[in-house]
Image (spheres, rainbow, N blue to C red):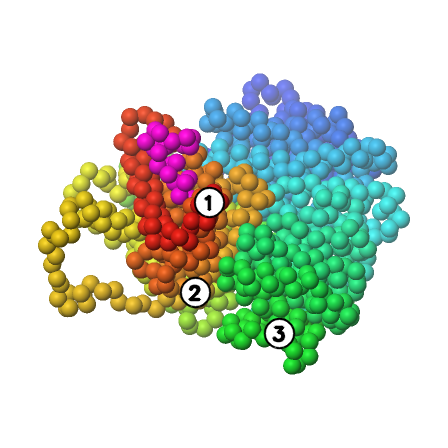
Amino acid sequence: MDDDLLKPVSTVTIRKKLEDSQPTPNTHAHAHERDQRAELKVSSPEIALRILKDGARPEELFTVLKYLKSTRERKNDFNIRIPEPRTTQIVHLLVNDIIPSYWSTFESEALKRSKSFNQDSLKHALIECLRSLLGIGSVVSRLKLLVAEARHEELRRQAISELLDVLQEVLGSLYDDLMIACLYYDKDQTKRTIFWKEVVDLRASGKIVSIAAQAEDSIEALKTPLSTSWIASGSQYAGWLGRQLADTLLRVPQDDTIRSNAGIEKMLAQFTGKSLSMGYPNDVIRELLKSYEMTNLQPRTAIGTLVQKLRPHEQLQFIDTTVSILAENFSSNETKQHDVSGAAGLLSLLIGTNESLRDHLVERLVQEGSRFYDDSTFSLRVMFAMISDDEDRTQQVMERSIRRFGDKLYIKHTPSFAQESLAQVILLSAGYVHRKYPMFLFTIARSSIHTTSISNRLNATSSRARFLGMVVGTAISQLVDKAGTRLNFDVDELDTDEAKWYQQLTSVQDKVGDATDIEDFLESKWPKSEAALTGTELVAKPAHKPTQKTSKNQSTTHAPKTAVQKPSTSKIQIVDDEDENEAEDDDLIPYAKPDSDPSDDDEDPTVVSRNRPSAPVYIRDLITALRDSESHDRHVLALRTAPSLIRRKTHFGKEVSDHVVELANLFAGLGDHFELEDFATLRLQSLVAVLVAQPQEMGRWFAKAFFEGDYSISQRGAILSATGLGARELAGLENGEELVGRVGEMKEAFPSKKLPERFHRLYGGVEDPVERESKRLERDMMEPMALSAADKLSGPNALKVRTFSSRMDVEKKRKKPVSNELGRIVADSLFFPLAGRFQMTLQAYGGKSIQSSPHLLPLYLRTLALILHAAGPSSPSLPSMTSEFFDLLLCLRSYAVKDENVLEALLFSVLMILDLNAGEDAVTDGGRRICTEMGKEILEMQVWVEGVFEALNGKGAIGLEMGPKGDTGKNRKEEERIGMLAAGVLTRIDEIVSKFQRLLLGDMVTL
């Protein structure tokens, strides 16, 4: 009766495990021997190996693991961390036999009732025995094998899940001594070097991330609701490597002699260089700087020595990444001098006396290379503080910058925001040179280099280029000329706040900070509480594994520990009493349990969550709820509430402005954890709300995130869509929510052949809002030309009957003027950052970048066209945007002939440019302007579009790769659309050419 009383009610995995460990009739002969073995103390690896081979019981396993854990500190004897034949056999048994048998039983009631040991101690001991190079390598190898087999065997995937948990636990300790132990592996330098090379290849090469990601993919095929592990995320794993490196730097001996003799600095440099090559250098260096203490002298010199030991190209990568990280979250208008001094002091620690790195700063300041075009004002000031005491380098920066600033090709083909950055370099260098070497500045101001530079700027066709030339010329003249002879252009542009901000750059004077400035800067940039949180919470938190099936609306978040430790409720006690009564009366036969009803699951009080989440009312609550990827109700409610909450809080207090970057980061990288049908729509609405809240700041952020962020193709597409739709909303053309669409408001006007909504999302596809809006604009532009052509073919005008409308009808059809808030910020905040970065990407990577792929390039071009259309024909920046956009389209002709979607988007963009500048709605005579300024480009585009049009009809020489030429209606429709756009472009160009024929005659001759 006692045995029956202790039987578990439900069958779980532990029952099978424990039954296997109980003696059977065939093993009674060895029972006495096993009991004696358990009483013996494990004193050698041979005994431990024999016990593991024979099949250890929980008590025996705990004894063995306790012994193996105690050997970790031994140097001249057996050590579980040192690779040798006995260690290899033991680790192999732990990974292949012990983990499959015991890992899932650590949370069982049978182990919890054990009096000889604690299940947490057993689990901890197992993890500590595997926390070595051999242990991690064995787990990774076993995981790789199981992933390959899991494609054909479903049963292997449970083992994969267990090994993923083990790998997270093994790597989860932030402050372990594994790195230290590897550094002092052996006295022999050769053996230590070979061993350390294996450590670097395993930990810092990305093998663990790759295998973990493959393992998670195989688990997700089972629809297992496991949360994403941090070891499968490249950015999170790279951050963990940075924290490990910082911990190791702090714990190794700081004596230079010991470090040099042991080769520690070189070994850590190898680890750092390999970590930077994973593809996430920003995460590695950010966490390294965030977690590294720099208050003492020795640690500060240690990180500088580490940088000097890197290879030359790794040093440049480290410094470039550090400069970009230091400038994060610092806007140009809010930069404080003590922040610049602290950042410069930190950069000085890293560079030290390395002359090549200081020369690299000079190259970066003068933009020698397209990757240096995007330096912010904060980073420019930091680099100038580094070279401010060097006369040769400061003068070299100024002279080379002015020469580059006035180059005609640079003015015409360089993105506008890159030219703005170079203008800031000239003004900063002019201030430093004027204070220390005034005669050199006077000589430069009177030289032909400066005069030619300003003249080329004033003769430029771009209004932005002319503005920068006037600002630089006026600022330098104020420094070297007397009050009566200073340069004065007497234009309104120089009286704006922007022009005054540029001119005050000559008075900026930053210095390299000391240890106190560095500490203050790091504390203000990364508070200690934040650093501590990101350093421990991320790696210590294991993946969540729900142990029972939950309902759809039930929260999957673990209850707090206090709730788990509460005494048993009265209902559970009543069930136990009923079991006892039933056990006392064996004659009664119980009724069979009824079949489970699915509707009863939600009525079970032990399953249903009565704690319904409430909608967030503060931005901080919204951010916390969105990051909670384990609670279904809370996460979904926050996602649905986010757009309206952000819009309500935009003009109420500073909640949105203080957290706008954090919100943008969160929504841009948000994943669909619960497979919501309207997830894409909700995320897009939230991104649009964020952009509209702070358009000047977030426009640049969206452009930078699209090109430099660690996002997938779908996430980058959402960023582009939000940029285009947000621009239209700012222009007052149409409500963003109506453009995106609301869930539940899609109504069919009449029955059709369209699939039900659920199946339409799966098989019919969802049209992107940007593409839908561009098609509508395309119809608006083509209809007038089609009507005009039909009108010409219908007969002479004298025979046509004209109808005259009344004044009231004309007034009704006239569009009401709307306030276009986009016109003031469209160029600097939205268009130029997005267009200029693409040119930089083309120069750096050609067609190999993800932005140049056929999946993103059409959406990118349509987004730029929508922004241009939203700015309107009356925008003061329209000439500059037209010139830069048209140059970009000319560069993309080779991509367009390879993909029909890119070709269609390119032709649509050309038609949009021509319609805005020379169409019926053009405010000024834009046709004359583009013929004067862009005559050659217009004619070149005309010749190419004519070739495209003829190629569609099978007559042209341009090789269009339009995909399979099967007899499908879709291909024919695509060709018809492209042919229609090409005809529209040619029609619009013919109108311009016929109207301004004399202006284009000279350009025709040159072609």
Of the two numbered discs 2 and 3 in the rendering, the one whose residue sits closer to the viewer: 3
Query: Residue 367: horizontal and vertical position, in percent?
Result: 65, 54
Residue 970: within the magenta?
no
Quarter of the image where the N terminus is located: top left
Which residue is pictured at 47% across the width and 68% down the height?
A: 655
Q: Which mark is residue 876?
A: 2
Q: Which residues are magenta?
A: 941-960
Of the two numbered discs 3 and 1 in the rendering, the one whose residue sits closer to the viewer: 1
Q: In this rendering, would 794 be left or right of 601? A: left
Disc on the earlier residue, 2 or 3 = 3
Q: Is residue 143 above or below residue 252?
A: above
Q: Which residue is mark 1?
A: 1005
The amino acid type of the residue labelled 1 equals Val
The amino acid type of the residue labelled 3 equals Leu
Q: Main secondary structure of the magenta part?
A: helix
CA gap, disc 3 and disc 1: 40 Å
Query: Residue 941: horizontal and vertical position, in percent?
Result: 42, 44
Q: Is residue 22 above or below residue 510?
A: above
Q: In this rendering, would 474 be left or right of 188? A: left
CA gap, disc 2 and disc 3: 25 Å
Find numbered disc 3 in the image and state the secondary structure of the residue it sits on: loop
The amino acid type of the residue labelled 2 equals Pro
Which residue is pictured at 86% across the width and 51% down the height?
A: 256
Q: Which residue is mark 3?
A: 487
Which residue is pictured at 73% across the width and 29% down the height?
A: 87
Looking at the image, which residue sits at the far bottom? 484
Q: Residues within 10 Å of mark 1 (few under 14, many from 20)?
A: few
Q: Nearer the viewer, residue 156 or 871?
A: 871
